[in-house]
Amino acid sequence: MVLYTLDAEFVMMADGDTRKLDHMKKKRRKHLAACPHEFPELLMLQEKGQLKDSDIRKALSPLRRNAHGEESPNENREG
């Protein structure tokens, strides 16, 4: 998850798991793929200085489940 922009070429990223907030990764924009998900609640926490790794993990967990082919908890099940 991109947390903030350093300049026109670089952003800082964290996932709350392997890349924690105290050791973010500097990444070139050209190596990233766009994702249609935004987390305004995390942005508000970051602006207040209250963002934690657990907040990021919680926000990303539905996306990780879908990426691994598991059903999202919000999807309806038949039967």
Image (tube, helix red, strand yellow):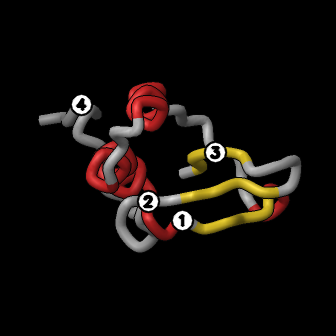
Q: Residue at x 41, y 73 (%)?
A: 18
Q: Earlier in the sequence, mark 4 or mark 2?
A: 2
Give the quadrant of residue 51.
top left
5 relative to 78, above or below: below
| Closer to us: 55 or 58 | 55
Residues under labels 3 and 4: Cα distance?
Answer: 34 Å
Residue that extends furthest to the left in the rendered view of this protein: 79
The residue wearing badge 3 is: 4
Q: Are marks 3 and 4 in contact (CB under 8 Å)?
A: no
Tag 1: amino acid:
Met
Q: Is 42 displayed left or right of 72 in the figure?
A: right
| Closer to us: 46 or 19 | 46
Mark 3: few/some/many CA within 10 Å (<14, 14-19, 20+): few
Label 1: which secondary element = loop
Q: Residue at x 43, y 26 (%)?
A: 44
Give the quadrant of residue 41.
top left
Q: Are marks 1 and 4 in contact (CB under 8 Å)?
A: no
Q: Earlier in the sequence, mark 1 or mark 4?
A: 1
Q: Is 78 displayed left or right of 34 in the figure?
A: left
Disc number at residue 24?
Answer: 1
Tag 2: amino acid:
Leu
| Closer to us: 48 or 14 | 48
Q: Position of residue 12 (x, y in %)?
A: 63, 57
Label 3: which secondary element = strand
Mark 1: few/some/many CA within 10 Å (<14, 14-19, 20+): some
Residue that extends furthest to the bottom in the rendered view of this protein: 18
The residue wearing badge 2 is: 21
Q: Are marks 1 and 3 in contact (CB under 8 Å)?
A: no
Q: Are marks 4 and 2 in contact (CB under 8 Å)?
A: no
Disc number at residue 76?
Answer: 4
